[in-house]
Image: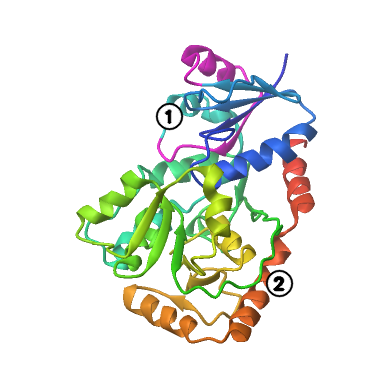
Amino acid sequence: MSYDVYYSTGGGDLIYGGSDVWVNHWIDNVAPKLKHPSKLMIHRVRPATFQRNKIDNLEISWQGDEPKEFDNIIGNARRINILHGYYTPHKAIYKNKDKIYSNVIHVSLDLSMKAGFQMGIKNPLHFASSLEWEREVAELSEHNIWIGLDKTPLHDKVDNIIDIPNFYEFKNNLPTCMNNRVGFAARVETRKGVHYLDGVDSQVLTDLGDFNYWKKQGYRFEYTRVYQYKYDNVHRFFKKQDWGISHSCHLNEPFGYSIFQAVDYGKIPILAHDWLKEYSYPFRAFGKEEFDKRLKDIESLSEKDRGDILESLRSFLKKYDNKEEWVNQYLQIYNS
């Protein structure tokens, strides 16, 4: 029987970053409306907490369960739709690259790999990646979908990129928190700028092993409390009232779920200059020195001014609270 494959490196109970959140949004909202028989192929070891082999009409296979069968299913598919792929070639996709129909792009490798040089970091922390593979997959795919808010260098190299920014549902809309401690909830690859928190009273929700990498680079973080990241703890972390300023100053950030979450939970953010440039915002920074200046600027605000600035940003971001439109845009591609 003819079927389409939807390939991912995460999802379900495996939520390490924004791309995995995106995959779960896809599972919940797009998958039930697919017209052609479909299989979700997750290129990871199945977590012990995830026992389902099917969600509604969507069959799910994990590469770690039966690697050979995993490859066979992909090889016999009508189409391959990449929901989130590895940033280097892997056999399952490379052997069947002529079947790639759509490719969702979650990060610009070009911009991400340059971040260390831009920030002057001698030993940057970055995931394994290949610019050549990013370009090759994009050229092979009939539909490339960019999830971010601003254009990337790939837009100038490939002419079939569709912009479908992620969505975020504002469910909390909390008033501004006046606590001046800084919070950070993200991975700690170089472009996220976690080293800006050195010497700053702060709390961090991230992977402890990756965070320790920066300590080995000489940063002390003597005023930083670190919590081991678990997706189930994200809501609890953002709802805490003992921090009220969000370190959202992430260079080359594609969409930034954590930025939207900060605003939703009443935390006023410090943003990077290159994020959502169309919106005029007073607290942007690049580098530790400018970050510390913006921190002092926020600390000096009255509660009314702080609340007005936050509410204005929140109102602007609510145009991305558009789940139904987001779903329909993907269905137009997958069901064509």
Q: Amino acid at mark 1?
A: His
User: Which residue does the image show at 54% across and 65% down from the upper left?
Assistant: 241
Instruction: Give the magenta-colored segment's residue range.
Output: 63-88
x%, y% of residue 68? 48, 12
| Quadrant housing the C terminus | top right
Q: Which mark is residue 315?
A: 2
Residue placed at 39% from the left, 60% from the top? 191
Report whether 47 appears left or right of 111. right
Q: Nearer the viewer, residue 231 or 280?
A: 231
Task: Work out whether 179 lies above or below 152.
Answer: below
Indicate the quadrant where residue 149 lies.
bottom right
Task: Pick whichever of labels 1 and 2 is earlier in the sequence.
Answer: 1
Residue positioned 60% across, 61% down in the render: 260
Q: Residue furthest front?
A: 242
Compared with 299, 69 (above or below) is above
Residue 198: x, y in percent?
A: 30, 66
Q: Mark 2: which secondary structure?
A: helix
Q: Secondary structure at mark 1?
A: loop
Q: Residues within 10 Å of mark 1 (few under 14, many from 20)?
A: few
Which quadrant would the N terminus be assigned to in this image?
top right
Disc 2 marks which amino acid?
A: Ser
Residue 255 seen = no
On screen, residue 189 above or below 183: above
| Badge 2: residue crowd in 10 Å (few <14, some 14–19, many ≥20) | few
In this orientation, which residue lies closer to the viewer: 136 or 199? 199
**Which circle marks residue 4 in the picture?**
none
Residue at the image position 56 percent from the left and 33 percent from the top: 13
Front residue of 181/43: it is 181
Q: Is 66 left or right of 222, judged from the image as shown?
A: right
Give the residue number, with chain letter if any, for mark 1. 90
Q: Quadrant of residue 250?
A: bottom left
